Image (spheres, coloured by chain):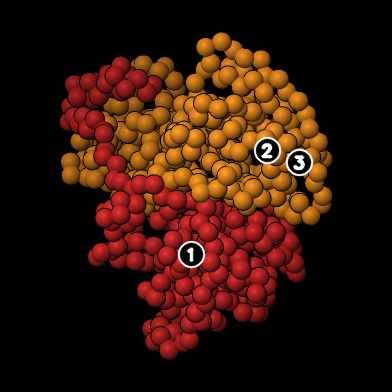
């Protein structure tokens, strides 16, 4: 292993949290790290706090507006000019589309959706959950080049002891119209609602809420915690809540700092979507519910009694509405 | 429209997973296998595209003889043709993608449909790897698809919302829940599907790019501190979350 290229994505004047996570993971490999940003260097300077010292901004008119084909080709050109043999990308919705194309172009093995990476005598070993998180595999690439994607929210961004100054250089890349066959026409935001994929705390409700009219109990606790509202498959299928809130195998896979499951029994399909959360809390009146087996903290009780009391107590501490 | 639907056979979600003696793979003894749930949306979308645009739906899987079962399901749902690429002994996602790409090159599909992820290895890489190998566009996690002439319009789920995208055929599309409601095959069609031929293909030798070093069952190291529902319990619970777990 010679050198790592890490993709950084801007979000306003900063980088996405997943980019700081990727920088931290890349540094843990103990070889030089260089960043790559696509189209604009917005927010790159903030990566100095996490120890990034070098970043290349790939420039081309076709990089404005995301296209996985153009983006993959740009990353590969930077990897080649920088002499890196490892590319680290966050496994968010962009990265999941992008990384396989980078791997194809570099003839590289892809270690996808990793939750831990180590440098094992010059070879990257990546740990990844398989079979809905019921097992985990340690994998390594059999190729010279390696592409690694990291499950968001699993790696904790680590600040450097002293803030580095990021040396940013721009480099033109070669692309043509055939590299941009997919064009983003519009982005529809879920206005006014925090998305479960972006939230640090999630409060989810299940069938124990008995009906859509009772979800205000979940929403009230969520707002005291500054959390996103999630839902189990049962309540989404029943039409109580929108599909974009569904956590689980046919919904979204999340790893928040705190996951609160209210009235959710914890079917394996649900656990598949949230079992890598840092702290799991369960509230359920059935003491034998499988959710308690994966919970750090739990309350055996009826959500209708417990949630209002819990919401008041939590509100006294957070002071949020 | 020439439609290729790639499907995979996976262990039933509720199956208990244990590690095989090699320490690297799943012990398949007694495991019930099913059609990957997301692939049902891919098959259904293929059938709907054929109903709208006419054409042929080919269902394809990579696997051993027992994987023919899911091809029979696809045929019963209405696929015109079924093809199995006989699995090489040591397959990774790349060798599977490459053998599918080689087959696709031989039939030149207008659209390749597949599930957004297979629920065994969950690596979300097949659509983009196929797109990369075939040098055609791909869109993943699609919850709405409209094709007019050769213009493809799709919606895909992203953090905090949806992206509306435009592209052109040929294309690879991976299906998200919500794309459609898959039909249930009817009994006479299930019976007829049993008699239909399944084409068998032996893939070229392809070298795997990822090796499994080890597989294990993670121990749950969760604290399991469970309390009751009295006011004192709830106060203690909030204290634990705030002071011990420090989560808010």
Q: Nearer the viewer, residue A236 or A213?
A: A236
Residue A27 shows up from this direction: yes
- For mark 3, give the secondary structure: helix
| In-image side of B18 versus B247 (left or right) | left
Do the dots labelled 3 and 2 sit on one chain?
A: yes
Q: In this figure, which residue is indicated by the disc labeled 2?
A: A79
For the colour orange, the matching chain is: A
Q: In this figure, which residue is indicated by the disc labeled 3?
A: A63
**In this view, the mark in front (2 or 1):** 2
Residue B64 versus residue A116 in the image, above or below: below
- For mark 1, give the secondary structure: helix
User: Residue B80's x, y, as percent?
Assistant: 55, 82
Residue at 65% x, 29% y is: A35
Taking the view exactly as shown, the residue that stands out farthest to the front is A121
Residue B116 shows up from this direction: no
Residue at 67% x, 62% y is: B134
* Shown colour of chain B: red
Q: In this figure, which residue is indicated by the disc labeled 1?
A: B39
Distance between mark 2 and mark 1 Cα atoms: 35 Å
Quarter the N terminus of chain B occupies: bottom right
Q: The residue marked by circle 3 belongs to what chain?
A: A
User: Residue B169's x, y, as percent?
Assistant: 72, 65
Q: The residue marked by circle 2 belongs to what chain?
A: A
**Dots 3, 1 in contact, CB < 8 A:** no
Taking the view exactly as shown, the residue that stands out farthest to the top is A162
């Amino acid at each position: 292993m010679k050198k790592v290229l890490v993709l950084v994505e801007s979000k306003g004047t900063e980088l996405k949290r997943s980019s700081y996570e990727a920088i931290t993971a890349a540094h843990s490999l103990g070889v030089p790290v260089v960043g790559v940003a696509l189209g604009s260097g917005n927010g790159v300077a903030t990566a100095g706090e996490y120890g990034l010292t070098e970043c290349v901004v790939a420039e081309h008119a076709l990089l404005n507006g995301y296209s996985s084909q153009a983006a993959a080709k740009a990353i590969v050109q930077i990897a080649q000019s920088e002499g890196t043999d490892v590319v680290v990308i966050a496994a968010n919705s962009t990265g999941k589309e992008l990384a396989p194309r980078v791997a194809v172009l570099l003839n590289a093995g892809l270690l996808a959706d990793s939750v831990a990476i180590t440098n094992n005598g010059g070879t990257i070993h990546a740990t990844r959950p398989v079979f809905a998180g019921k097992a985990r595999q340690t994998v390594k690439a059999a190729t010279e080049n390696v592409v690694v994607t990291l499950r968001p929210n699993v790696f904790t961004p680590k600040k450097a002891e002293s803030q580095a100054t990021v040396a940013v250089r721009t480099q033109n890349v070669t692309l043509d119209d055939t590299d941009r066959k997919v064009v983003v026409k519009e982005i529809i935001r879920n206005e006014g609602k925090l998305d479960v994929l972006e939230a640090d705390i999630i409060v989810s409700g299940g069938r124990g809420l008995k009906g859509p009219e009772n979800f205000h109990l979940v929403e009230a606790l969520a707002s005291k915690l500054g959390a996103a509202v999630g839902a189990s498959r049962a309540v989404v299928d029943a039409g109580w809540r929108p599909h974009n809130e569904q956590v689980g195998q046919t919904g979204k896979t999340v790893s928040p700092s705190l996951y609160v499951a209210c009235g959710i029994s914890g079917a394996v399909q649900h656990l598949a979507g949230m079992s890598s959360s840092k702290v799991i809390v369960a509230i359920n009146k059935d003491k034998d519910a499988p959710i308690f087996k994966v919970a750090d903290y739990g309350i055996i009780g009826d959500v209708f009694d417990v949630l209002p009391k819990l919401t008041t107590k939590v509100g006294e501490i957070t002071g949020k509405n | 429209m020439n439609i290729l639907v790639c499907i995979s056979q996976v262990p039933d979600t509720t199956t208990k997973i244990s590690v095989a003696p090699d320490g690297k793979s799943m012990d398949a003894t007694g495991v019930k296998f099913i059609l990957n749930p997301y692939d049902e949306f891919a098959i259904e979308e293929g059938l709907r595209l054929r109903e709208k645009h006419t054409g042929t739906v080919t269902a394809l899987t990579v696997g051993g003889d027992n994987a023919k079962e899911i091809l029979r399901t696809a045929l019963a749902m209405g696929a015109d043709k079924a093809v199995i690429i006989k699995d090489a002994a040591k397959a990774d996602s790349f060798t599977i993608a490459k053998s599918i790409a080689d087959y696709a090159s031989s039939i030149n599909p207008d659209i390749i449909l597949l599930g957004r992820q297979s629920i065994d290895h969950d690596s979300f890489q097949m659509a983009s790897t196929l797109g990369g190998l075939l040098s055609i566009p791909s869109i993943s996690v699609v919850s709405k698809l409209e094709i007019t002439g050769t213009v493809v319009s799709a919606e895909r789920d992203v953090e905090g919302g949806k992206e509306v995208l435009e592209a052109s055929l040929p294309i690879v599309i991976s299906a998200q829940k919500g794309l459609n409601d898959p039909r249930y095959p009817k009994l006479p069609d299930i019976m007829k599907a049993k008699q239909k031929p399944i084409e068998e293909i032996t893939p070229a030798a392809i070298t795997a790019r990822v090796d499994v070093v080890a597989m294990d069952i993670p121990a749950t190291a969760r604290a399991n501190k469970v309390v009751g529902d009295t006011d004192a319990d709830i106060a203690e619970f909030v204290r634990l979350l705030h002071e011990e777990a420090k989560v808010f």
